[in-house]
Image: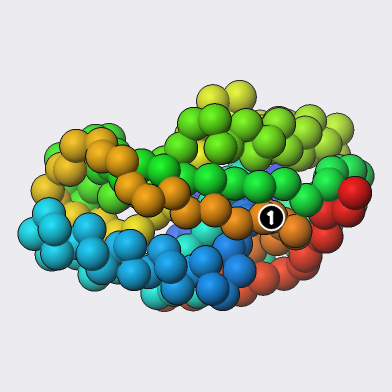
């Protein structure tokens, strides 16, 4: 029904303006290294998509939905889940670049890895468990492909090895993304402690 209020107080047919997600961000030096890698790979493969802004490089841990405005109820549940996670800092390593082929146009060109992401995978599952306990189970997806998006392009690039990019994750962040504005606003941060 048009105009009917939803569970979270928004109109059901209202256009989403806000996306919420948990993420890991690289430190500034690593983000610059990722940006340089994106520039080199773009030239090497003749890609036309512009690399993302350096401050936008991240690893999404869990998507928490799109909403017509900031949903404080979701933010509160997400904050409870995040505060319950206990984890030490861990290393992440990306050693490959590849295009995702989930669409024929505007394909994400990303960094990927395997063994160097084992601790990340454990952390992502632990956060998902706490999300489920906090009432956000519908967003705690068991299938997870950790990656860092470099750019979007219509051309597909086969997987290739790159010089490994590593950093130590020392915190995770709840992010508010303003849809269509390429703006990420950190809402809260949680440190990882030994």
Q: Residue furthest top?
A: 142
Q: Position of residue 173 (x, y in %)?
A: 70, 61
- Taking depth in this image into account, of 2 and 24 the one nearest to the observer is 24
Q: Position of residue 87 (x, y in %)?
A: 84, 44
At mark 1, the secondary structure is strand
Q: Position of residue 165 (x, y in %)?
A: 47, 54
At 33% from the left edge and 62% from the top edge, which residue is drawn? Answer: 37
> Can residue 133 be spotted in the picture?
yes
- The answer to which quarter of the image holds residue 159 is top left
At 54% from the left edge and 25% from the top edge, which residue is drawn? Answer: 143
At 31% from the left edge and 41% from the top edge, which residue is drawn? Answer: 161
Residue tagged 1: 169
Classify residue 123 as left or right of residue 48: right
- Taking depth in this image into account, of 38 and 64 the one nearest to the observer is 38
Number of numbered markers: 1
> Can residue 80 be spotted in the picture?
no
- Taking depth in this image into account, of 146 and 3 the one nearest to the observer is 146
Q: Position of residue 36 (x, y in %)?
A: 34, 69
């Amino acid at each position: 029904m048009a105009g009917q209020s939803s569970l979270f107080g928004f109109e059901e047919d209202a256009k989403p303006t806000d996306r919420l997600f948990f993420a890991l961000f690289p430190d500034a030096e690593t983000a610059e290294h990722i940006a340089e890698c994106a520039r080199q790979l773009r030239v090497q493969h003749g890609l036309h998509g512009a690399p993302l802004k350096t401050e936008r490089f991240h690893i999404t841990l869990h998507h928490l939905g799109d909403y017509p405005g900031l949903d404080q109820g979701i933010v509160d549940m997400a904050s409870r889940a995040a505060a319950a996670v206990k984890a030490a800092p861990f290393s992440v390593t990306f050693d490959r670049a590849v295009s995702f082929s989930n669409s024929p146009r505007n394909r994400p060109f990303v960094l990927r890895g395997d063994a160097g992401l084992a601790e990340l995978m454990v952390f992502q599952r632990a956060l998902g468990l706490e999300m489920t306990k906090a009432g956000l189970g519908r967003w705690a997806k068991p299938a997870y492909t950790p990656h860092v998006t470099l750019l979007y392009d219509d051309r597909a690039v086969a997987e290739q090895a790159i010089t490994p990019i590593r950093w130590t994750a020392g915190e995770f962040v709840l992010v508010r993304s303003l849809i269509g504005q390429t703006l990420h606003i950190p809402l809260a941060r949680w440190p990882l402690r030994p």
